[in-house]
Amino acid sequence: MGSGIVDLWNKGTGIKLQMEVNEQKLFDTNNSESVERNPLQDVHSKVVAGSVKDSKPETDTKIREFRFESEKYCEAVDMWPQRGRHIMAQYTDKAILVYQAFKPEIAEYATLHQSFEGCKSYKTTRMTWIKTNFLWMMYRSGWACKKNQEVILGIWIKRNFFERLLRAAKSTQHGKYAKNENGSKCAKGNKPCRLQWDPDHLPRGEKHLYRKAIQIGIKGELAEEYASGKGKTPILKITDVTPFVREQSRILNKSKEKQAHKIKNLWVARERIFAGLPEDLAQEIRLSECSKVS
């Protein structure tokens, strides 16, 4: 066995990093086989102050596929649209990352069990709201400082379930009737989901004047499905991103630094326009034109 230096490329910063790697094999107690650690694994948490917490060890494939990624805010804004209604999100071809804020009791249970099923404090009879936009979640939770919103969860859900939510909610902002998942009409008070376009927000909480962000309220059968256990759940992974959130909040609240310097050092979730929705659905939820391009 030996050691050496490997070059790592961080997509968020565009900076090449050097990392010393010990080429020894580590013993995996779960499957009693020796496995070689991927030097790219967990490098992101070494680049960015703060970390994220998962409850259980994951396979290398799952870590790569459903991993929370971030980038500097001052670089992210150059990649984001400045006008219109857009679903800004972190996503793969199989899943999309949504955020929810909870009190510690619920969040700790969900992170440990990778499901909300069985948590006594989690009520499927109440509408639960998900957001794809990190800064909107920070505004809503006060950077994890508001009561009962002290823990921020990043929840990877299946893309087809996310589209089902959009279809169930697509008519709730205009017209007299909403639509059930099967396309039948129902009174707006009985709608299965609620979709809202709200002003996006800047890091300090100011409203973005021209860009709208999406949030989706889930209830009824879809809420029960969302909270269900393994085998039925649309949830693929639940990660506690609160350590990352608190570190960025600390940067924003440094009293001796000028505002421009704070923003320069701020990191946010890496998000891009979620495109590729079916044309009829994109039109129904009133996406802006550049979001409809697949």
Image (cartoon, rainbow, N blue to C red):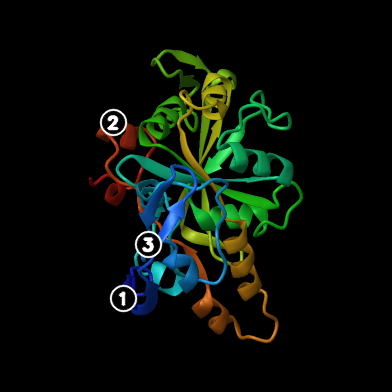
Are dots 1 and 3 in contact, CB under 8 Å? no
> Is 239 above or below relative to 269?
above
Q: Which residue is mark 1?
A: 6
Sequence-wise, the earlier of marks 1 and 2 is 1
Are dots 2 and 3 in contact, CB under 8 Å? no
Residue 251 percent across, percent down from the top left: 61, 75
Q: Is residue 86 visible?
A: no
Depth check, front residue: 280 or 35: 35
The image quadrant where one finds the C terminus is top left
> Is 245 above or below relative to 162?
below
Sequence-wise, the earlier of marks 2 and 3 is 3
Q: Is residue 34 visible?
A: yes
Residue for point 70% across, 82% down: 255
User: Which numbered marker is on residue 80?
Assistant: 3
Residue 125 percent across, percent down from the top left: 66, 23
Q: How far, Cα to Cα, is label 1 from label 3?
A: 32 Å
The image quadrant where one finds the N terminus is bottom left
